Image (cartoon, grey):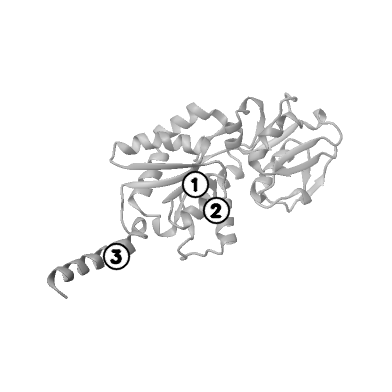
Amino acid sequence: MNKLLKVAAAAGIALALTACGSSSANEETDSKTIKVGATTSPHAVILEEAKKLMEKDGYTLEITEFSDYPNINPSTSDGSLDANYFQHQPYLDSYNADSGYSEGDDGYLVSAGSIHYEPMGAYSETLEEISLDNLKEGDQVVVPNDATNEARALFLLQDLGIITLNEDATIDKATAADIKENPKNVEIVEIAADQIPSRIKDVPVIVVNGNYALDADITQYLRAQEDADSEAAQLYANVIAVKEANKDNEAVQELVKVLKSDDIKAFIAENFGDTVQAAK
């Protein structure tokens, strides 16, 4: 092999090694660019504000918006995204379990920090106050069909006096099967959370996450919501999720720092009112 070919071969090997290493670069280096996936509101809106603050310190925040949940965690597990912002810890735990990921696995996701809490809310166009007295026999109440959010919805309905749950029902696992008392025999209708706001014109009560209420612009119909000091507020705080190996990445830590800053807390309070609250 002549000298020119040897140089070219060496360069090709170096390039190949560089390319092989690039797939895990976001885990091994402290890049100042971070790619974050998020649902539209409030998550992406909050990130856009954080982006301005991060730019002052030389960081670049690239935001990819998703209309719904399913593809965000897998895109983080496979490295397409460096982090995501859309979910609470129970949802994250369920994703890891359902995907067969355990601590130490390459695709295993962890929380890098709790950012905000979206109270589960009960909404109605026709009722000024949601109570047992204001409901008719057999009225429909629409709730999310995913396990964790359905449990929250049912506990809120219990707080409102609409139903009573079994004593062993828990805030993270309760289902309609746990309803012990249902004086008005309300029909609990379970559908995907993102489809619930559109049902507000068809039924007297819907119970849904704050982000979907924001997206659908129905917050004016909020009649009741989870208490900010409740167990749910702690358990269901929305987090920044990353691959386990990325948790201590410089850019990830900077993102969490900015999102937990007083500037972002003030932005959340000003723009979202009671539907979104900064995590404590």
Q: CA distance from mark 2 to mark 3?
A: 35 Å
Q: Nearer the viewer, residue 62 or 97?
A: 62
Tell which tag, 2 or 3, sits nearer the viewer.
3
In the image, is 140 to the left or to the right of 221? Answer: right
Residue 253 seen by the camera: no
Q: Are marks 2 and 1 in contact (CB under 8 Å)?
A: yes
Separation of marks 1 and 3 at Cα, in angstroms: 36 Å
| Mark closer to the chain start, 2 or 3 | 3
Residue 27 figure quarter: bottom left
Q: Could you tell me the amino acid type at mark 3?
A: Ala
Residue type at mark 2: give it: Leu
Residue lying at 78% horizontally and 43% vertically, measured from the top left: 164
Foreground of the two, 34 or 209: 34
Instruction: Please give the name of the residue rendered at 44% of the width and 59% of the height, measured from the top-left corner.
Output: 244
Q: Which residue is mark 3?
A: 16
Q: From this viewpoint, is residue 237 visible? A: yes
Instruction: Report the amino acid beneath label 1.
Output: Val
> Which residue bears the numbered disc 1?
239
Badge 2 element: helix
Mark 1 vs 3, N-terminal side: 3
